Amino acid sequence: MSRSSRTFRGTYFSCMSVQSVSRILAVAFCLVSACTPQQEPDQEPQVRILELQVPANFPEPEKVMAGYPLSEEGVELGRKLFYDTRLSGSNTISCASCHQQQLAFTDGVALNKGAAGTPLLRHSPGLANLAWMNGTFWDGGAKNLESQAFGPITAPDEMNQNLQELVSELTAVPDYVASFRLIFQDEIKPAYIARALAQFQRTLISANSRYDKYVRQEPGGKMSELELKGLTLVQQKCGSCHAGDLFTDNGYHNNGLDSDFSNHSYEGIFQGRYRITHHPADVGKFKTPTLRNVLVTAPYMHDGRFATLEEVLRHYSQGIRASPTVAAAVMQGAEGVAGIPLSVEEKQAIIAFLETLTDYEFIQNEKFSSPFN
Amino acid sequence: MYRIRRSGFYVAMLAILFLAACKEEKEGPAATTSVTVSFQHVVGSEPLQLDEVIYTSPAGDSYAVSNFKYFVSNVKLISSAGEQIYVEPESYHLIAQDGKTSFELKEVPAGTYQRLELSLGIDEELNHRIDHLGDLDPSNEMVWDWDTGYKFLTLVGTYTGQTRSGGLVFHIGGDTNYRTLALELPQPLNPRQDGSSQVLLQANVNELFQGPNLIDFDVMNSSGHGSGPSLIAENYTSGFITVLEAK
């Protein structure tokens, strides 16, 4: 809107300066074009619109808001911002400090430390296939990626940055000013920072593991008998939550980690989805993480309590804690006994299968790595 | 020379025609003007002053206010018979005791208006994302980033109650607390062509704490995220904002 009015005014002023008769023709054209101020002048550089490539074995991604097109330039700007320590108050922390590509964008520790030097209250999840997610954070509290980014940037224990200060720091970099102008036709504003980060993160698609090549019948898609047995077990015993080829239903479940959720400190951060919905049925429910790349995303769960996959499987087979909201799917024992019964061989098969979900192309893709190296 | 001037004349005529065509498209038949809507903040019968003054709440607690802000949105003017409605486009205003306390309704058609409608908070469509601009810019610190949405109203301060004392932190938000108020004007408003017409509103902080729900700070000194906010929202639906004058 502001752009079209600026264009209109510009045209008007150039009309006023016309003097010679031979330029009157130009006046007429000026005025004609003034009638349609919406039209973009030809010389203004355009961004190159990008379509997300949906993998053949994936469902359709969540709809991106109308008016939020992905572009090559927007994604590239988002990537720069993701790796830029200017986003933190101390200029020492970037998004990548807690979301490292070689670890499928998690950080390898249970509870990382940010700007405050104190452990965070939740574990950093990996970032993959976010375009299929309709709520982010372990409780889905952020309704979309554009709104999510303000969380880590401003949180005192994460990046502790003041948004206006961030805008002025970025505005001091001519390259950034030019990029924002090109992509958003405006000066740098917090909303555009978040939108650019979101554009980059939507392109973080992990769909080239050995398993993917197997289901798409592509070269390199060989799976052993043990791995295939593991696949069947995961589909049968875990597939109601770690569903489909995303290996998550992006839903919220209580998978029996705890039975006491009475601690309501930090505005309910330990109570899971209940913190957002205030429905008693959501107490202790957390978002199902994907099983993709799980071999490189240890430790596990919303607080990083399990260091290994063996511990995770021991939890599901022997460690389930019952509570009013615990999922029926983790109470698969005879007569509703807690746990998912798994033999030693079955556990081995599951872990063998989970290894086939590591997407080396994803964790090595240069398009996702730091542009500053 | 003559020939050139002549053709120049025709081109100029053509240009004027185009310009006229433009004009017709741009402006509707009715003349429009602007109306200023402004807010005065009081506590009971005293003017609100940040930090300086100790006020008495309806429940009898003493309190001081250090920060008071709220969103006024989707403003409309409605004519006597209800047949004419002016709807402000992109109508989102952050009103703050230490910031903006008025805004201008632009291109209001001539007419006789009897009612002002406004909403407290942000409608669902915009409240489900916080990457907005202007008064909605997240740097205005009226957002929740861990539970996406806007704080519709913020009141921060300190209090001394009958049994306790401490901080006051009321952050009211959430779709269910978005409320629309219909305010009758004391006399019909015929916006003047020179744009000097005004609607003067008053927001009374004490009304947040009574009618229908009496808020005792000893019992509730912060809104939290559960049912607390809706107690205050019920209160801001009745008596919080009143019209002082429409002239």
Image (cartoon, rainbow, N blue to C red):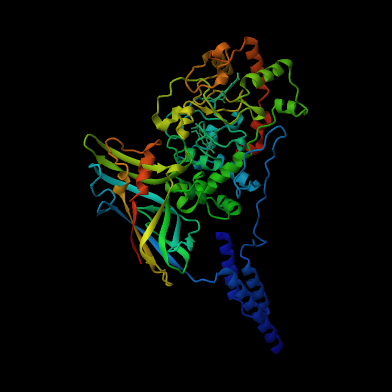
> Which image quadrant for residue A371?
top right
- The answer to whether A77 is drawn above or below residue B189 in the figure is above
Q: Decide which of B113, A194 is in the foreground and name it.
A: B113
- The answer to whether B190 is drawn above or below residue A23 in the figure is above
In which quadrant will I find the C terminus of chain B? Answer: bottom left
Would you say residue A147 is visible in this rendering? yes
What residue is rendered at 67% in x and 86% in y?
A: B5
Q: Residue furthest front?
A: B81
Would you say residue A83 is visible in this rendering? no
B207 relative position to A257: left or right: left
> Which image quadrant for residue A9?
bottom right
What residue is rendered at 62% in x and 10% in y?
A: A343
Q: Position of residue A353 (x, y in %)?
A: 67, 20
Q: Position of residue A324 (x, y in %)?
A: 47, 21
Q: Position of residue A226 (x, y in %)?
A: 71, 15
In which quadrant will I find the N terminus of chain B? Answer: bottom right
Instruction: Give the mark count.
Output: 0
Q: Residue furthest top?
A: A344
Q: Position of residue A53 (x, y in %)?
A: 70, 39
A177 relative position to A116: left or right: right
Q: Residue furthest left?
A: B162
B199 relative position to A370: left or right: left
What residue is rendered at 51% in x and 48% in y?
A: B126
